[in-house]
Image (cartoon, grey):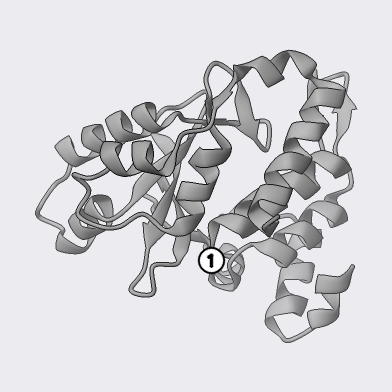
Amino acid sequence: MSELTEGLERIHTWFKKNMPERISSLASGLSREEIEQSTRFLPFKLPEEVYELYQWRNGSSGYTFLFENYEFMSLNAAISNYREQMGEISYYEREEAYWFEHSFPIFQLWCNGGVVYSVAPNSQRNSVIRIYDCECNDYSLRYYNLTNLILHSADWYEAAYFVKQENAWDIVNEEMKCLLDVKYMARDYLSDSIARKGAAVSRICEEIYQRYIDGDISLLDT
């Protein structure tokens, strides 16, 4: 079993134990042939990790799946989202247009359809993960591959507690949150989070991010 599928199964196990009603929202996986047929129009080849993801399950319609905030879109929903974003491209910005054309949305924020996690294959066909926020015009790099995103989410669920006041699951230990960020998220994103003026980064996270950027790899073993 690959690390990606192992992470997905860990998330599935967590839901089965804590929110069993959501298990039924996961659609059966697709065959490789079905995925290839549906995505043949794309101007790029989907990375193997995306094939593995949709062969595992075909989305989680109606419920959030990733970090208790993002819905796992079915392949058809993801294709519709891709076509919609293509229709909104402003070709005045060539770099932005290229990014839209060569990225494929997979996870959509449940309360704002304009925020998605997208796979943006690079020249080595790695599944680099960027987030797109149409309101903030943000399409920053978040993860170097899909596996890291899924493992981050799996660790997040296993460390989360139910917060009654908010009626939601969350990691109440801020240091634990930051250590998981360091373990899985792109180094460039962590660096940018510190550098950007007004970024919503806690003092604890800023200190941990900076230690990692300065070369403290012991944080990865925490």
**Which residue is more in the foreground, 175 or 29?**
29
Res. 171 visible in picture: no
Furthest residue to the left?
Answer: 92
Q: Amino acid at mark 1?
A: Tyr
Q: Position of residue 221 (x, y in %)?
A: 87, 72
* Image quarter of residue 136: top left
Quadrant in which the C terminus appears? bottom right
Q: Mark 1 falls on what kind of element?
A: loop
83 vs 91: above or below: above
Res. 186 visible in picture: yes
**Which residue is more in the foreground, 55 or 123?**
55
Quadrant in which the N terminus appears? bottom right
Residue at image position (86%, 56%) is 175
Furthest residue to the bottom?
Answer: 215
The residue that label 1 is drawn on is 144
Residue at image position (79%, 49%) is 155
